[in-house]
Image (spheres, rainbow, N blue to C red):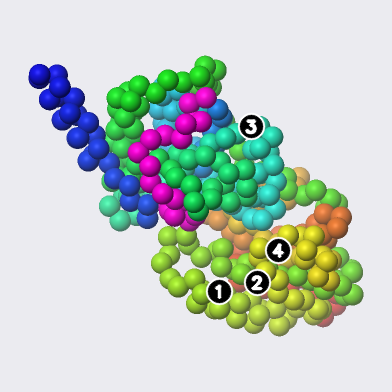
Amino acid sequence: MKQIIFSVTFIFALNVAYGQDTSVFPNPFRDLSPANELPETVMYTKTMVLVDAPMVISPDETWQTFAETAHQAFQESGIDAVAYYHLQDARAGHDVSQLLTGQLVGRNIKNVILLSYDPQRDNQRCGLLMTTFNEKASFVSPDQSAYMMTGNDWSAMMDQFQKYMLLNQYETQNFLISDWPEFFTGAGNVIKGRRAEGFAQDLKLDKLAIYRHEEYSSISPMASSDTAQMLADSSSAIAQIMRDYPFEYGLVDFALEEDEIRQNGYPFVLMRLQSSEENLRTMLGYEDPTSEAGSSGEPVYKYYIKHIYTGDVYLGNTWDAAPRWEDALRNHIQHLREDVGL
């Protein structure tokens, strides 16, 4: 009788010890439906891990060392987490997301874990989320469910997770789990065609496509504002900056595929990446990723122009990244004007 009472008490205590406050997670993960069970596939297929934390958490801790503690818990639980990415790198830009998705599908990865932690947040809110990978650049779909735990203390929450795994006696078929996490920088080099540190001369003749809400993705996913208003404000902001662009351009819907954009009369499209300078230089194929990069790990924006049909990329003749997208875009246009003698 005492054992039964203890079991019921333990289960109740475990259930109330953690919450499912989805606001801890960035979009689109916060819109998933909370579930009290792990995804069925997580105990017998591969899993990727996205880390939503500062690049440098403290003088003694980075996002990688933070992830190492989580990996140990996953390994002991029988979860085969084979690839770790900083969320900022995985969502650095359109080209990164598309290429990374293909890599993940090719590795037969079926699940995604999100670790959210920032000691600067109110009450140090943190969270762990597990769900299936939808094999798309968004990583997850709005209609799917996800196992979630949230709390105010990361170590305590992970202890509760391991107790949950022990209590539910999940059986694993993952028998060759690595002792250490493997880290990746986004999708690596994202350039498929020719790489040029300059500007395309054909921009004088051909129209440049600009995604209509390119700037909207730069707004913090934790922000709570009216989406329509943000889109309107951002469209106005980019239109003002693009007044200095000397050639013909047009705004296109962000949901359009590149082939559709080209069919609509735009051979070129303006692209943008956001990550640390060192990571951006890796993604864009610079020979020495650290030669001009800052070491703070703080995210910056870098614009470039892509020829859709060939995949050729024009980076500009000067490293023009900036912490604000507005400044990065102004820099890029100014260098283009100088290149054509304006």
Give the side of residue 2 with respect to residue 140, left or right.
Answer: left
Res. 256 mark: 4
Residue at x-position 37% and y-position 52%: 22
Along the polypeptide, which appears first: circle 2 or circle 4?
Answer: 2
* Disc 3 residue crowd, few under 14, some 14–19, many 20+, Cα 10 Å: few
Disc 2 to disc 4, how far (Cα)?
10 Å
What stretch of residues is rendered in magenta? 25-44
Along the polypeptide, which appears first: circle 1 or circle 3?
Answer: 3
Question: What residue would you read off at disc 2?
Answer: 212
Residues at discs 2 and 1 in contact (Cβ within 8 Å): yes
| Quadrant of the drawing holding the C terminus | bottom right
Callout 1 secondary element? helix
Residue at x-position 15% and y-position 30%: 9
Can you tell which of label 2 and label 4 is closer to the viewer?
4
Residues at discs 1 and 3 in contact (Cβ within 8 Å): no
Along the polypeptide, which appears first: circle 2 or circle 1?
Answer: 2
Nearest to the observer: residue 162 or residue 38: 38
Give the side of residue 33 with respect to residue 248, left or right.
Answer: left
Given the image, on which type of amino acid does mark 1 rest? Leu
* Disc 1 residue crowd, few under 14, some 14–19, many 20+, Cα 10 Å: some
